[in-house]
Image (cartoon, grey):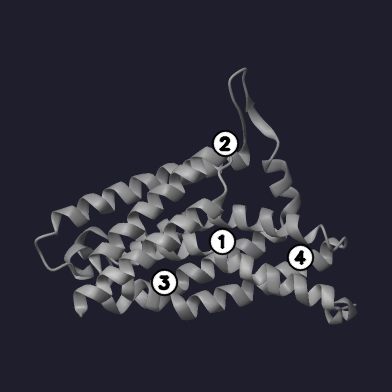
Amino acid sequence: MLEWLAQPEAWGALITLTLLEIILGIDNIIFIAIAVAKLPKQQQNKARILGLFLAMFTRIALLFSIAWIITLQTPIIKTSLISLSGKDIFLIAGGIFLIYKGILELKNLSLHTNEEISPQSNTKNTSFLTCVLQIAILDIVFSLDSVITAVGMLQNTITNPKEITLLASIAIIIAVFIMIFVSGYISDFINKNPSIKLLALCILILIGINLIADGLSYHISKNYIYAIMGFSFFVECIRIYKDKN
């Protein structure tokens, strides 16, 4: 039954899909890094790993509910001006939440510009359960985008739905374990450098705007966001390096 896994096409699709899942998971890693930063240090790693495992299980669950996902793309609100499906409503709600969260964190960051910024300084406003709940809600939005993209890509090379589900599940599991390994370093780097945290929050708001635009059928390629993110991060790293030397 699994003989098709030995085929070069299957391995090529698995590698490509794993890389795709990692790239699409960047949004999730940035949000998780911002969300767990307000927890006590001893809880941050636990919340980050739990958040990524939630993302993994959400994506796999959505894979096995592909028929339901297809129905989400059917318009449920239709007027002369706008047509919204269940997926569009999820994206718009997620985008609004990201923008709200980004602006709120920017406000908190500005209040501590003259103080030593530490995660513990804001823990009184954030509980472990609240943090995990926020991550779980956003996981659903990010997972919808990830699963629909993955299934659409695999349908071009694999016709058997069971094979698509299995291959996508393997890719998701591999990608999540890779992200668990690197997410700690990314979170520490963001939290130790206020300018990087500021940049991450701006990217978070930009991702939120992109989600709302997608929900309103104004499709903006994520490649633009990744290009802006990469270039800004590169320039900021050079500045940090020069300041330290």
Are the residues at dot 4 and dot 3 in contact (C-beta closer than 8 Å)?
A: no
Residue shown at the point (53%, 71%) measured from the top left: 53
Q: Mark number for residue 24? A: 1
Q: Earlier in the sequence, mark 4 or mark 1?
A: 1
Residue 135 versus residue 206 in the image, above or below? below
Q: Mark number for residue 97? A: none
Q: Earlier in the sequence, mark 4 or mark 3?
A: 3
Cα separation, mark 1 vs mark 3, equals 17 Å
- Binning the other alpha carbons within 10 Å of mark 1 as few (below 14), some (14 to 19) or many (20 upward) gives many
Give the foreground label among 3 and 2.
2
Q: Which residue is mark 2?
A: 218
Pick the front one: 43 or 151: 151
Task: Please tell me whether mark 1 sits on a helix, a strand or a loop.
Answer: helix
Q: Amino acid at mark 4?
A: Thr
Q: Amino acid at mark 2?
A: Tyr
Task: Please tell me whether mark 4 sits on a helix, a strand or a loop.
Answer: helix
